[in-house]
Image (cartoon, grey):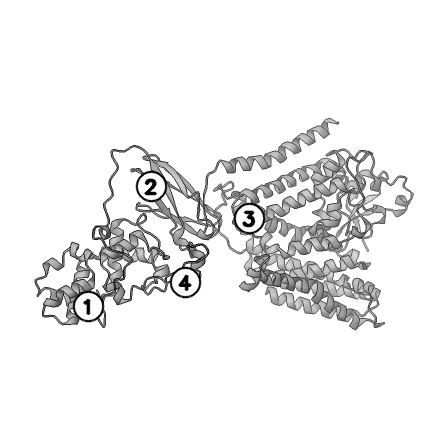
């Protein structure tokens, strides 16, 4: 064999192997977190290990549509993840535990199921014990019917109610503890011994509900609702968000099945403009539903995503669909 | 007809005779090809950001259909990396000619397969699945790898380049349209070939292999089956092979009457029309049907596609030929001869379609070249290049000019070929006019 032939063969072999092996090696050493719509698998990997105090550098790419990344109950700017591009973020955890990360973009029908966990290990002073949610302390059955037997004919006015409330001695009915543990209808009923008319009693309820919220809290609740709830429950709370029909139509496919082949039926998203439903629901009950999610429905659990304060703010905002907090 | 011999210049001739320049190009092409396969398999599944999709179906396609085929004919085949590994293995060498005793089976391709029909079928199959192949990196990789291994396998079983000649889905239409190119490889003097002892250009010698494309250069009359591998320039002992510049569509002056080539023209014409409607159109339902392979909707799409290329277009053309037939009895030969006019028409359809397709997607090249695997690299600082159509204001006028130019070119070809088919050129021209109107309507 001529030297030129031998050299050519060597060059071709090395070049061909190199052009295959080199990218494969680099690819194998570049850990990327792939985001796909939940129907295609969601996050991959969906479990990430981290250590307390050690920066966790994460690189993401989307394999299909625009996604977003955020860690529940953590102050951070969500990371946008564009198809075919790589986004990066660095996180540092100061407490051990299991954190939930989730998609922040309405990527598809099962967007809400696009979640994963970050398992943070490491020694710290001591683990904090979790406090029981209020609905547990109160022993509320989140799945029991809670409709108000009597509802107002028009949205009660908080402004009118404020004037009326100032004439009453009802300080025990205006405390935060009372507000969170009672439904608007229960307060309405507790006001039956006053001389107020039915509509005036509803106005007072509206005023007390407004008094237990803050403009900043309502604003945050509105923002969180728009980002996380409106897709199903609708921008105006009517239970008719852009995914609502699809959820109903594809309930069997998008939910787990029970009893073998028998598909579960999908409940339509809750209608927050329904006065029977909302005026019969206490903030504690709504907090519980948000924390735990709707068992057997399409409602995901948000307990690992939102802080308690965020949930209370969302709850405050939900009553906007029943009460008129606007100035005259 | 004037020709200008390029090989009269020693520099050009020496570059073509020397194996090293071509070898360097082969190695680079092969590296790019292998990298495209790897990128499709492990890179981002997002087609518009994956090297395999962007460089094969946008960059390579642009070069092939807008430059290589119209101006260099089978120039791409001369540097194509797909058959080169099989070629080396078949010969048992990279630079040296094949041994006298074949290393492998070295069978002759059966006579019934020595035509363009298998290429027609392979192109049609690729075309039917093209919506998925063109957008899904892993599928592109599988197709590329399949072509590579098919070429290697066929080189082990059959003599010469059986894959290129009889199976390559791309090679068929390149050969068809290469007839219009202003570049040809021909012998200088046929008498020299006739008297040449041993015919080393076909049978091989110590200087090189016999024609890998199974062509005797002395009998070359058209570009269709000459792969421009330059092997005959190296083996000719009489310096009788020339690379010439010539007028466009010179080969079409003597029309072919082979039905396999005729149907290649219909397949390409129909595929351009269907692609213009499906890929560039706004009908989402049809796009989805084309993408949802093996679904009932896809079968409907496939049936429509096949009906257009094998039924509607040939059927209408048959009627045109029959209408213009002076003897009122069109035969297959008349039909095939008259269809020569569709060759420049089809090429210009593809150029027009590719102009919008390529210019619309060209900016993906900048992003993909900096981050070919979608791993977050920025090799050339262009990874963040945002998508935007290029030269969008020029696309429509350019497409119009190309299609009108193609119509004029095909009409001129019909004027020459129709008399040889014994028919009037008028119905063929009307056919070309109507299909051009349809293409214009679909693209503009």
- Chain letter of the residue beneath label 1 in the structure image: A
In terms of secondary structure, where does tag 4 sit?
helix
Select label 1 or label 4 by which is in front: 4
Same chain, labels 3 and 2: no
Q: Is residue B263 above or below residue A309?
A: below
Q: CA distance from mark 3 to mark 1?
A: 60 Å
Q: CA distance from mark 2 to mark 4?
A: 32 Å
Q: N-terminal of the two: label 1 or label 4?
A: 1
Q: Which residue is mark 4?
A: A248
Q: Secondary structure at mark 3?
A: helix
Label annotation for residue A324: none
- State which quadrant residue B22 falls in: top right
> For the residue labelled by badge 1, is the local secondary structure a helix, a strand or a loop?
loop
Q: Earlier in the sequence, mark 2 or mark 1?
A: 2
Labels 3 and 1 share a subunit? no
Which callout, 3 or 4, points to the residue nearer the camera? 4
Check disc 1 and report the residue beneath it: A157
Pointer 3 chain: B
In the picture of the structure, the residue carrying the numbered disc 2 is A98
Look at the picture and state if A291 lies above or below A12: below
Q: Residues within 10 Å of mark 4 (few under 14, many from 20)?
A: some
Q: Quadrant of the C terminus of chain B?
A: bottom right
Is label 3 or label 1 in front?
1
Residue closest to the eye, A213 or A138: A138
Is residue B282 among what the camera can see? Answer: no
Contact, CB < 8 Å: mark 3 with mark 2? no
Q: CA distance from mark 1 to mark 4?
A: 35 Å
Tell me the quadrant of the picture where the N terminus of chain B can be found: bottom right
């Amino acid at each position: 064999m001529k030297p030129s032939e031998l050299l050519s063969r060597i060059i071709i072999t090395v070049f061909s192997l190199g052009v295959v092996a080199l990218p494969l090696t680099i690819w194998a050493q570049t850990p990327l977190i792939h985001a796909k719509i939940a129907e295609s698998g969601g996050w991959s990997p969906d479990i990430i290990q981290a250590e307390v105090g050690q920066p966790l550098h994460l690189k993401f790419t989307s394999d299909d549509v625009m996604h977003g990344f955020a860690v529940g109950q953590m102050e951070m700017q969500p990371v946008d993840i564009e198809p075919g591009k790589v986004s990066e973020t660095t996180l540092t955890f100061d407490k051990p535990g299991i954190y939930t990360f989730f998609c922040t973009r309405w990527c598809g029908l099962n967007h809400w199921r696009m979640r994963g966990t970050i398992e943070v290990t490491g020694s710290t002073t001591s683990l904090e014990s979790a406090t029981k949610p209020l609905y547990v302390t109160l022993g509320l059955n989140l799945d029991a019917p809670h409709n108000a037997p009597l509802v107002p004919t028009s949205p009660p006015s908080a402004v009118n109610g404020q004037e009326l409330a100032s004439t009453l001695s009802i300080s025990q009915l205006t405390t935060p503890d009372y507000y969170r543990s009672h439904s608007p209808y229960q307060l309405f009923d507790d006001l039956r011994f006053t001389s107020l008319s039915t509509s005036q009693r509803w106005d007072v309820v509206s005023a007390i509900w407004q008094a237990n919220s803050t403009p900043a809290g309502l604003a945050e609740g509105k923002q969180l609702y728009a980002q996380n709830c409106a897709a199903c429950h609708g921008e105006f709370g009517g239970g008719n968000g852009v995914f609502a029909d699809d959820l109903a139509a594809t309930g069997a496919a998008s939910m787990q099945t029970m009893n073998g082949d028998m598909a579960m039926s999908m409940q339509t998203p809750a209608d927050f403009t329904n006065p029977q439903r909302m005026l019969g629901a206490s903030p504690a009950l709504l907090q519980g539903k948000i924390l735990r999610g709707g068992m057997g429905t399409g409602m995901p659990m948000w307990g690992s995503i939102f802080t308690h304060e965020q949930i209370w703010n969302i709850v405050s905002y939900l009553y906007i669909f029943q009460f008129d907090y606007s100035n005259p | 007809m004037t020709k200008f011999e390029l090989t009269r210049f020693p520099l050009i001739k020496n570059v073509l005779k020397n194996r090293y320049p071509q070898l360097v190009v082969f190695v680079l092409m092969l590296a790019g090809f292998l990298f495209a396969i790897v990128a499709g398999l492990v890179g981002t599944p997002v087609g518009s950001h994956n090297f395999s999709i962007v460089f094969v179906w946008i960059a390579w396609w642009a070069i092939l259909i807008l430059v290589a085929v119209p101006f260099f004919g089978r120039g791409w085949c001369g540097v194509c990396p797909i058959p080169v590994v099989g070629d080396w293995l078949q010969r048992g060498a990279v630079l040296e000619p094949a041994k006298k005793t074949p290393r492998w089976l070295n069978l002759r391709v059966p006579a019934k397969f020595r035509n363009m029909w298998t290429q027609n079928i392979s192109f049609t199959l690729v075309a039917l699945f093209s919506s998925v192949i063109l957008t899904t990196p892993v599928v592109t990789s599988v197709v590329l790898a399949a072509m590579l291994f098919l070429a290697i396998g066929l080189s082990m079983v059959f003599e010469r380049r059986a894959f290129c000649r009889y199976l390559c889905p791309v090679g068929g239409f390149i050969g068809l349209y290469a007839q219009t190119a202003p570049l040809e490889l021909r012998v200088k003097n046929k008498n020299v070939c006739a008297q040449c002892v041993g015919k080393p250009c076909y049978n091989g010698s110590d200087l090189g292999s016999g024609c890998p494309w199974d062509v005797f250069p002395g009998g070359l009359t058209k570009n269709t089956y000459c792969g421009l591998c330059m092997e005959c320039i190296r083996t000719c002992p009489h310096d009788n092979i020339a690379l010439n510049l010539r007028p466009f569509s010179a080969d079409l002056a003597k029309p072919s009457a082979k039905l396999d080539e005729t149907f290649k023209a219909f397949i390409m014409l129909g595929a351009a029309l269907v692609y213009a409607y499906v890929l560039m159109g706004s009908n989402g339902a049809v796009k989805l049907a084309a993408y949802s392979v093996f679904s009932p909707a896809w079968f409907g799409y496939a049936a429509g596609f096949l009906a257009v290329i094998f039924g509607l277009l040939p059927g209408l053309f048959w009627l045109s030929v029959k209408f213009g037939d002076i003897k009122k009895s069109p035969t297959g030969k008349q039909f095939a001869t008259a269809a020569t006019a569709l060759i420049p028409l089809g090429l210009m359809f593809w150029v027009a379609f590719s102009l919008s397709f390529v210019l619309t997607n060209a900016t993906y090249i900048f992003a993909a070249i900096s981050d070919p695997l979608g791993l977050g690299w920025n090799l050339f600082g262009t990874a963040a290049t945002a998508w935007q159509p290029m030269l969008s204001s020029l696309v429509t006028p350019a497409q119009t000019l190309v299609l009108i130019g193609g119509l004029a070119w095909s009409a001129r070809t019909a004027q020459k070929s129709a008399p040889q088919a014994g028919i009037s050129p008028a119905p063929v021209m009307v056919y070309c006019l109507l299909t051009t109107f349809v293409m214009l309507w679909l693209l503009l």
